[in-house]
Image: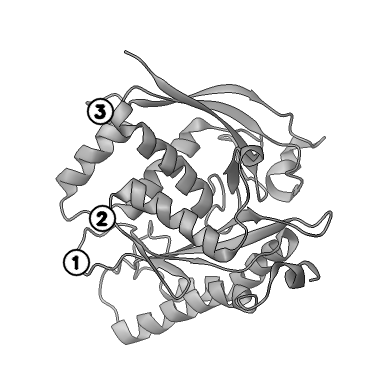
Amino acid sequence: MPEWEKIYVLSPVTKPEWHGADIKTPEFRFQELKSSLRFWWRAVNYFESAQKMHREEGSLFGSTEIKSPLRFVRLDESELPVENKKNYVKRNNDCENIYFRVKCCCENEEQWDRYQKLFELASYLGGFGGKNDKGSGVYCLNQEEKTLPSDRQTMLNQIKCAMDKVSGREYCIKSNKIVLDEKKKFLPYAMLQSVSVYNPITKAKFESNVKDAQPEAKKSRNNMKDKIMAFSPLMIISAYPAPSTKKGSEMVYPILSRFNVIWQGKYDRTVMNVHYKNYVNACEEPFKIYRSRGIKDCQND
């Protein structure tokens, strides 16, 4: 059976926390990458029937009964740029010299374009590995082969295009957010509600903003403890490279993906909605001040 294949170069955008079972040794694992693809496929595909979801998911990623038509082959990788690799996972921020060349192979011609768009979408909206919901482990694909999005609107259009292709639905852009304009009752799992893209900031400022947002976000999340499903992410913070006009300044587009809330048990809806709103505000607020500013302005921060 003929195969369709493409070679990708994965380059980290933010510090990766990819590690093995001992949580100490840096390790790039295909299992985490495939889990990321499966997660984002579910997030943008809305199902009313669990049977239909499992059937389509199995045809794409495999199941106990079906072999997945998608597979990865590792070609080569860079040497991790640290002497003490134990410290790499938690403290090293140097991502410039890290890369992984992998070959993506598929036996299903009909699904091939969808896989490529899914890979692209996953690189936009979130990384994989430890703390991927807080901006860690974000990567870009074949950066040297493509032109970086020149502005926020271009970035939004690229993400929307990938979401439309992966889901087979037509998302729309409203107030600088990508949303699905449908009102239906779906299954209780992590579904993407909206994607917000903010004006570019330096990578250092992005990491600082994410760190500053965590105390208040964690406090609000703890107030909802036991009232939401443990697997519900609520919000995932990501970043994508932006063009830089200042030498030595790495710029990124902050990207925030917001998910539906999966409530459980008895709770006061009014109180929980306040905690949820506080959580969202804590994550978004550090990036809102850059909405009306241009790339040159932000590079001076």
Residue 172 in the image, given as x and y percentages of width and height: 36, 65
Q: Which residue is mark 3?
A: 64
Q: Secondary structure at mark 2?
A: loop
Q: Is residue 75 above or below residue 142?
A: above
Q: Is residue 126 visible?
A: no
Residue type indicated by callout 2: Tyr
**Tag nearer the camera, 3 or 1:** 1
Q: Is residue 163 above or below residue 104?
A: below
* Residue 175 occupies quadrant: bottom left
The quarter of the picture where the C terminus appears is: bottom right
Q: Secondary structure at mark 1?
A: loop
Residue 246 in the image, given as x and y percentages of width and height: 82, 59
* Residue 70 occupies quadrant: top left
The quarter of the picture where the N terminus appears is: top left
Q: Which residue is mark 2?
A: 46
Residue 218 in the image, given as x and y percentages of width and height: 54, 70
Q: Is residue 168 left or right of residue 218?
A: left
